[in-house]
Each structure stands twice: as structure tokens, then as C-alpha cells.
Image (cartoon, rainbow, N blue to C red):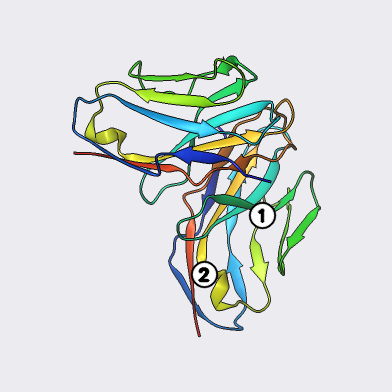
């Protein structure tokens, strides 16, 4: 009964580098979410997938951020030309059903990104 | 827009003390309310939830009551343990799927 896994757990990038963060949701979960958690803050919504369809990307902070889930399971969050303000923990969550107000989201341990 | 405000930490208590972490929210409609806990090095875990007014969520000795009249969802525990030391997040979800979190409250329980 594996939970949501994310890799790498820690990533250090030089400013301007591209990074890719991976999320493996719980098997069979339809919905997948990405959140960004700045130091000392609560997570903030980035984007939502229902299967392979990205239904909401309203939280992505700039066009340098791109997410995909091509086969409706594993998802990758890519950040191009990283900036220092991108330093944060990136959390992935999945949910069994089509997302709704009462459905529980299960979170992974996060990837801590540090941009130097 | 929708938002969650929770008391700033850290909250430092001795073992077996009573815990209250305040949480208030602003939302249109009737959101679902949640408390998540984040232990060091681990992901967020759902602690309890309530989906309508006057509901009481409870788990592991923690409880919170959805108070619509005061737009609050305060977290309480009668007797904390050292193992309860963690960061606690209050969150809401409106009619959509987005969780909106407070800024978190760090709890430190001393033996």
C-alpha cells in the first residue's frame, strides 16, 4: 500500500537551470494536484489533473512552470530558468475520485527545491 | 476571496497540557474544513475534517467543531504528548477541489 511518492526529495539548482520534479500518485487515483509551500507558509495550489487532462493551471506562477501527466498516472512539474523565488517545497497530492469538496487528498513528502 | 487565518506559533506546551489552536476562515457558501498535520520529514496527513456546520471532526484525541456563526474551526486536544509535536495546518475547500491553507502553527510539546 504505497502512498504518494516524489523524487527527488531534495534538489539544488543554480539560477537559470531547468528542473523536473516527479510525482507518483497512489495507483488508480484519478485526481492529481501540485502545491507550492514557501518556507513558513501553508501550501498554495498550483495545478490540477483529472487523469491526463490538466483542468486547472491557474496557480502556476509564471509561464516558466509547466506540468504534465501524459498517461494519467505519473506527473512531472518542470520549472524552466529557475529563479531564487522558486525555492520552496513542491507537494504532490492525489485523490481517488474526481475532485470534489469532500474528497480526501493524500500528500507526498514533497521535493525541497533550493535555487542558488 | 477565500482564506484561512490561524494563530501564529510556535506553541510550546508541557506534556499532558490542554491544546487549542485557533482557526478562522473567510469563504462564500459552505466550505469543507480540514486540519492537516506535518511531522518532521513527512508529508501532510489529514488529521480530521468536517463538511457542514456543527459537525465535529475527531481523530487521535484531537477534535474540532465547524462553527458557521463564528466562521471558526479551532483544534483542541485535552492532553498533548511529546509525539504530537508537529506543524498543524487548517484548510478549507469550497465547492471546487482546491485546498486553501492557513500558514501553519508549530506545536512543541516538552516532556
Q: Residue at x 22, y 26 (%)?
A: A17
- Decide: is A53 above or below B48: above
Whether discs 1 and 2 lie on one chain: the answer is yes
Element type where label 1 sits in the image:
loop
Residue under circle 1?
A: B73
Q: Position of residue B3 (x, y in %)?
A: 54, 40
Of label 1 and label 2, which has the lower sequence position? 1
**Residue in front for this viewpoint, A107 or B94:** A107
Viewer-side label of 1, 2 = 2
Question: Percent position (x, y) of residue A57?
Answer: 50, 19
* Residue A48 sits in quarter: top right
Q: Toward the viewer: B58 or A51?
A: A51
**Residue B89: image x %, image y %?**
55, 53
Judged from the image, the secondary structure of the residue bearing numbered disc 2 is loop
Q: Is residue A50 left or right of residue A80?
A: right
The residue under label 2 is: B85
Please report, as a chain letter, where disc 2 is located: B
Q: Is residue A87 left or right of residue B93?
A: left
Q: Residues within 10 Å of mark 2 (few under 14, many from 20)?
A: many
Depth order, front residue of A76/B53: A76
Q: Chain of mark 1?
A: B
x, y percentage for residue B62? 69, 66
Residue found 71% across the figure and 30% down from its top: A28
Q: Which mark is residue A113?
A: none
Instruction: Please state the total of marks drawn on the protein image.
Output: 2
Against A37, residue A82 (above or below) is: above
**Disc 1/disc 2 C-alpha distance (Å):** 20 Å
CB within 8 Å, label 1 to label 2 = no
Amino acid at each position: 500500500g504505497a502512498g504518494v511518492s516524489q523524487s527527488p526529495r531534495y534538489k539544488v539548482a543554480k539560477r537559470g537551470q531547468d528542473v523536473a520534479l516527479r510525482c507518483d500518485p497512489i495507483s488508480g487515483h484519478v485526481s492529481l494536484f501540485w502545491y507550492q509551500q514557501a518556507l513558513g507558509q501553508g501550501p498554495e495550489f498550483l495545478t490540477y489533473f483529472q487523469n491526463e487532462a490538466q483542468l486547472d493551471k491557474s496557480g502556476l506562477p509564471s509561464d516558466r512552470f509547466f506540468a504534465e501527466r501524459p498517461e494519467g498516472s505519473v506527473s512531472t512539474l518542470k520549472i524552466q530558468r529557475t529563479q531564487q523565488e522558486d525555492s520552496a517545497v513542491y507537494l504532490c497530492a492525489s485523490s481517488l475520485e474526481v475532485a470534489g469538496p469532500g474528497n480526501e487528498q493524500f500528500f507526498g513528502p514533497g521535493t525541497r527545491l533550493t535555487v542558488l | 476571496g477565500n482564506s484561512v487565518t490561524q494563530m501564529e506559533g510556535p506553541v510550546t506546551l508541557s506534556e499532558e497540557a490542554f491544546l487549542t489552536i485557533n482557526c478562522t476562515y473567510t469563504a462564500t457558501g459552505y466550505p469543507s474544513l480540514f486540519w492537516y498535520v506535518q511531522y518532521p520529514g513527512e508529508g501532510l496527513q489529514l488529521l480530521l475534517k468536517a463538511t457542514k456546520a456543527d459537525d465535529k471532526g475527531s481523530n487521535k484525541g484531537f477534535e474540532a467543531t465547524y462553527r458557521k456563526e463564528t466562521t471558526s474551526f479551532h483544534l483542541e486536544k485535552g492532553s498533548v504528548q511529546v509525539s504530537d509535536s508537529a506543524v498543524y495546518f487548517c484548510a478549507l475547500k469550497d465547492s471546487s477541489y482546491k485546498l486553501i491553507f492557513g500558514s501553519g502553527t508549530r506545536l512543541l510539546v516538552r516532556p
